[in-house]
Image (tube, rainbow, N blue to C red):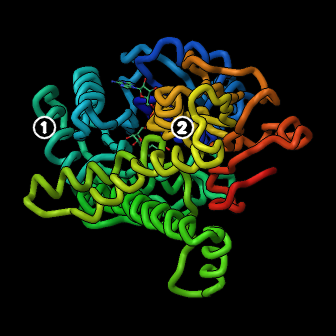
Amino acid sequence: MKIAIVGQGYVGLTLAIGAAGAGHTVIGFDINTDLVLELKQGITRVPGVESSELISLIDKKNYTPTNDPTNLIGAEIVVIAVPTPLDINKNPDLKYLEDASTLVAQILTSDTLIINESTSFPGTLRQLIKPIFDKKNKFRFEFASAPERVDPANNDWVLKNTPRVIGGLTDKAADRAASFYRSFCDEVHVVSCPEVAEAAKLFENTFRQVNIALVNEFAKVTHSLGFSTHEAINAAATKPFGFMPFYPSIGVGGHCIPVDPTYLSYYADRNHVETEFIKLANQTNLEMVDFIVSRISTELNGNLQGARIQIAGIAYKPDVADLRESPALTLIKKLNDLGSSVTWFDQVVVTDLPGRSTNLDSNIDLGLIVTPHSDIDFSIWKDKDLKVLDLSVSKKDYCLPKYL
Ligand SMILES: NC(=O)c1ccc[n+]([C@@H]2O[C@H](COP(=O)([O-])OP(=O)(O)OC[C@H]3O[C@@H](n4cnc5c(N)ncnc54)[C@H](O)[C@@H]3O)[C@@H](O)[C@H]2O)c1
């Protein structure tokens, strides 16, 4: 089938390569001309997408990255995978989705199945996307929702073996979408309507957000009592039923956990339903940085002013280049505001944020492990026996001052 995928970021590119690898002819459309230029040269920053694979699929004409929307014409299926962030007031910002839908609706010249993979609140497909097509185009379209669950840099759960939830506006749409996803996904779970699929996606990430908040709160308790959070969590995790371990950190980042629960609470608010639990969890995770700053201050005997602090890894999680909503950015700002001299080393992210070091330094008062990308070499900190606080989610001692 000819498939067009609108948005070639983490989600869209992963899908494009999966679908192209399964033998479909895939058009990868993005408005970012620099990104398209890079993709054409086989350059990718999306974990799990290899440059060699990209080049081979382009050579075989299974995959064509483009910023020319006329290439969408003739696609049997158009999948939309564009950002759905929060706006300045921390409300859902659906402008990318609206713009992408408008552009696609204006260009298509035949009946097509439109699938939305972008995360949004229930009703987005039916009440936002479909009306745009109805208004802009005389052709008859089918619509389905298939929210993406990709977990960048997770090598165990990938596009193929992560079950896909699908809800169609009609049975025909659901069947067509299911058959497309079955061509490269092991398991497809069809639900009764798009709203269920949209809600399930938000609930999955809200579940994580709430549990992360709970464990972050637990970390404060164990710290005040003077024992290891990780040891306590690992002890609880020996229970073979009814418990799932989560680990504390400086907060949550990326395009999902800090954002999706707000889409759910926004939707609930609109329907006059209280979601205090979600809002409290969000607040708890945001406040974690303040707790960390006080921990750092204790480590430095209250001498934050002028302290030379270096952070290892500022992305929101290891081995991804994504800086969106990364709590490391808030930590850097707070420490700088308190007069510390903060540098950071991260060989994965691409950013012009000030304070970058090209290596881990030994000439520091405190090292902070925030996002330990797998190839960071900590030997310089180890060899010099520097004071280091491990704030990462990795299963290490967390609440006591930690030396590597
Ligand atoms: N990143 C994740 O781990 C993840 C996981 C599951 C779901 N999601 C969801 O998937 C969606 C996409 O997220 P992402 O991480 O891939 O975002 P991204 O920023 O990595 O990629 C989105 C791409 O869409 C492009 N774009 C924006 N407007 C466009 C338009 N009108 N036409 C064509 N291209 C356009 C951007 O240039 C960008 O390259 C979001 O709703 C997100 O919540 C993300």
Q: Secondary structure at mark 1?
A: helix
For the question of whether residue 321 can be seen, the reply is yes
**How many tags in the picture?**
2
Nearest the viewer among 60 and 184 is 184
Label number found at residue 112: none
The picture quadrant where one finds residue 51 is: top right
**Residue in view at x 18 percent, y 33 percent:** 133
Check the image and report above or below for 269 versus 94. Answer: below
**At x 79% / y 27%, what residue is drawn?**
363
Depth check: give the residue in front, 174 or 200.
Answer: 200
> Earlier along the polypeptide chain: callout 2 or callout 1?
1
**Quarter for ligand 1?**
top left
Q: Which one is closest to the eye, mark 2 or mark 1?
A: 2
- The answer to whether the beta carbon of the residue marked 1 is less than 8 Å from any atom of ligand 1 is no
C-alpha separation, residue under disc 2 versus residue under disc 1: 40 Å
SS at badge 2: helix
Identify residue type, mark 2: Ala
Identify which amino acid the numbered label 1 is placed on: Pro
Q: Which mark is residue 131?
A: 1
Please tell me which residue is depicted at 22% across the width and 21% down the height of the picture.
106
> Looking at the image, is 392 positioned above or below residue 186?
above
Q: Quadrant of residue 140?
A: top left
Left or right placement of residue 27 versus residue 47 in this view: left
Q: Which residue is mark 2?
A: 328
* Residue 73 coordinates in the image, percent (x, y): 36, 23
